[in-house]
Image (cartoon, rainbow, N blue to C red):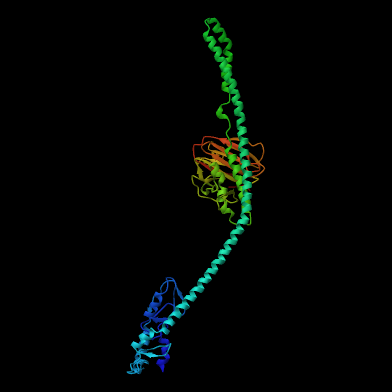
Amino acid sequence: MASVDLRPELTCSICLCIFTDPVTVPCGHSFCRTCIGNVMDTQGIGEYSCPECREMFRIKPALKRNQSLSNIAESFQSAEKRIAIPCANCILSPVPAVKTCLHCEASLCEDHLRAHSKSAEHKKEKLRNILQKLTSQREETEKRVQSLEVVKRQVRGKTAGETERVTPLIRDIGEQLEDLKKQVLGEISRQAAQVSLPISDLNRLLEIKKEELSRKMGDIEELCNMTNPVTVLQEQESDRADYCDAEDTERRDIKVHDVEDLDVGLIAETLHSGLARIVTKVTRQPCVPEAPDMLQDVNTAPDMLLRVNAASDMLMDVNTAGDDVSVSEDLKTVSVSEIDHRRPETPERFLLNQVLSSSSFSTGRHYWEMEGSESGWWVVGVTYPSIKRKGRQSWIGDNNKSWCLENNENLYSVKHDSKEIRLPLSPSCHRFGIFLDYEAGRLSFYELCDPIKCLYTFTATFTEPLHAVFGVYEEDTWVRV
């Protein structure tokens, strides 16, 4: 009775016979090793599943031999042999049955069992299992197709919406760029006319001088051809003053290389600030969240067009900062500190409230912007790294190693080598641009208002790398790059 109750638990759900060499798959179900092996051989890679519970496996599962189940099955089969259940198909000479088919409940011997497993009903059962599996796979595939269709419709809708939103924005950018183009070209034309005027005046002076020299050369040639020495001496004495005047005039004439060149820094700043305004306007558009990424190249366009390196990554070197200044965590702001930081005393550190940039410039064109406090006393500019760090010669602008723009209680001036030039008008805003052309030896300071205005341009022959330098000398004074 017990053996009959155990049969369902000891039967392989594939061959419907008592387990032979039973193995267990990861989900916990057991099968004959041969049966489960044949089933998995028919399954595709990545689509392995348990025939019992349909759990899916990405890789072919390892088959672990179930020793306990094998022992129970063998004991059950031994008990059945002792009971000697006869084969249902061996009528003439009874033969003990080795297995009982759970599907038709027939007990069969080895010979009839082989034939029975090949019967149409058994094959149909296998086909039903395969059909069930294929049906499940088809349903899963259909779900995936439907999901992809949903995504496809979403992409189409988003594409249409983005196109509709971006098109007028691009058109607006084009119009603004056209206006900026006219503004920049107008500035170039204005500067060209301003530079051309003294050239034309100089050219007229040189033509007059050329005619005068030709006349004097003719007079001298006539004297050379005279045969009377007395006449030659008299003519030479009378014209000597004219010749001397000609030499004095030549010394007083303006040299061609003294004519001013185009202010490339002002042109670059006009273009840069115009593009910055366009980018700022675009990034504020709520309908285009990716605008900063889309326009990051536009923001650097003036640098590419005019080969000006924007020092947007300029940082302050704390190792050069005096004890009474505070440098912000992002290394872009310096201010007068209320406490003494007592920083380590090193050869690089200023005794005064000054700090250098961590980077230096030894070639090319460079541009950076800064903002200073409205009140107080601050200076900004450039300096050689060999500037003194203590004493009077360490003040920015009070030596031949530094050039600066200074604001002392809203009175502005520029200074180099202790020579100070007061600016006639105080800037109406407190944002400034600094343009350095190292090879040309030009350092320009610009007021970043509308319109942009050049405050002053230093000319020099630079002999060392240049650091940006910042100084703050009174309470509530700060400078930010």
Q: Quadrant of residue 114?
A: bottom left
Q: Quadrant of residue 376?
A: top right
Q: Is residue 373 above or below residue 456?
A: below
Q: How many marks?
A: 0
In percent of width and height, residue 340 lies at: 57, 50
From the viewer's perspective, tell me whether residue 372 is left or right of residue 44.
Answer: right
Q: Is 153 or 189 nearer to us in this picture?
A: 153
Q: Is 429 or 373 nearer to us in this picture?
A: 429
In percent of width and height, residue 435 lies at: 57, 41
The quadrant of the image that shows the N terminus is bottom left
Image point 49% across, 46% down: which residue?
346
In percent of width and height, residue 394 lies at: 54, 40
Q: Is 269 or 445 nearer to us in this picture?
A: 269
From the viewer's perspective, tell me whether residue 133 is left or right of residue 195.
Answer: left
Q: Is residue 33 visible?
A: no
In percent of width and height, residue 294 lies at: 57, 53
Image point 56% across, 17% down: which residue?
214
